[in-house]
Amino acid sequence: MRWEDFRTSDNVEDRRGEGGGGGGFGFPGGGAGGLGIGTIVILCIIGWVTGINPAILIGGAETVTRQRAPQEQQQGRPQPDRRTGAPADQTGKFAAAILGNTEDVWNQVLPNQTGRQYTPTTMVLYTGGTRSGCGQARAAMGPFYCPLDKKVYLDTTFFKEMEQKFNVKGDFAYAYVIAHEVGHHVQDVLGILPKVQRKQQQVGERESNALSVRVELMADCLAGVWAKNSNDRFNSLEPGDIEEAMQAASAIGDDKLQKQSQGYVVPDSFTHGSSAQRMRWFQTGYRSGQTQSCDTFRASQL
């Protein structure tokens, strides 16, 4: 991928090196150990009002509780300055360049195709763990988008994990990861995420999972729309790039991940879609280049 000539985004918050606590990409989750029942109830109410999965808030509160004592001991120590703008290292430069390109593409595509103005997201780079508007961000969650603070969170060691754990590598595979999370922000700008989150509060787990799958497959499709328009405008793709994205999409399908981790597949528990679905919807967006082609909620077959 010819990313070196992309405009680098200034909407990057580099928290790497600050430390902090800490599967597929999308939205984080957590557990409830160590919290009182009253706290859990309050967090569930907050989750219901905001539309955020209460498990996210509970997981964040649990982590904060575990870390409070050592943090209190360090309150007198100066905190590191947070770096904003384009980072200087190669990985940071890459992430900032891909984010900048998504901004240039969606600033043009979204108004032209939907009549909505695009408001850029901020990308937070971190290692290990950090705080997000949706609770504690941890490396084990993978990249995710938090609709409460409108930010994408990326532990950059995830790229190395993709190569070591999933045998997926290549700059366009990594760009696909970022574009997928930006796709969630596009959904937020279009008002889709709030509607889905409200609906998820009204249905059971199986139906909620099915809605989550449609959200994630739409983000895959929007990543394809970005790739198509970026290539048309900037001639950014090189031979083999689309294959890298297909390899990444296949590697993180729910069916493949479940087969690897537990030896069998439970489709009703899917939250991101199968490998075949993720590849198909990326290709749908890439072939059409049209945001309207990504309406997974009206699709009779995913």
Image (spheres, rainbow, N blue to C red):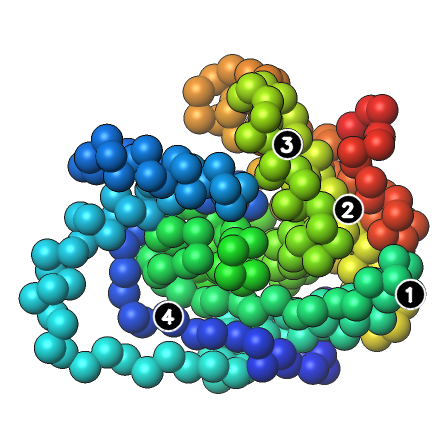
Residue 133 position in % (x across, y down): 44, 57
Which is nearer the N-term, disc 4 or disc 1? 4
Disc 4 element: loop
Residue 137 position in % (x across, y down): 39, 53
* Three-letter residue code for mark 2: Cys
User: Residue at the location (44% across, 20% down)?
Assistant: 262
Q: Are marks 3 and 1 in contact (CB under 8 Å)?
A: no
| Gap between marks 2 and 4 measured at Cα | 30 Å
| Gap between marks 2 and 1 measured at Cα | 18 Å
Q: Residues within 10 Å of mark 4 (few under 14, many from 20)?
A: some
Of badges 4 and 3, nearer the viewer stands 3
* Three-letter residue code for mark 1: Asn
Q: Which residue does the numbered mark 3 point to in the structure image?
A: 199
User: Residue at the location (82% across, 44% down)?
Assistant: 294
Query: Which quadrant is home to the N terminus?
Result: bottom right
* Three-letter residue code for mark 3: Lys
* Three-letter residue code for mark 4: Arg
Which is nearer the N-term, disc 4 or disc 3? 4
- Is residue 297 left or right of 92 when viewed as pictured? right
User: Residue at the location (71% across, 58% down)?
Assistant: 189
Of badges 4 and 1, nearer the viewer stands 1
Q: In the image, which disc is placed on residue 16? A: 4
Q: Which residue does the numbered mark 1 point to in the structure image?
A: 112
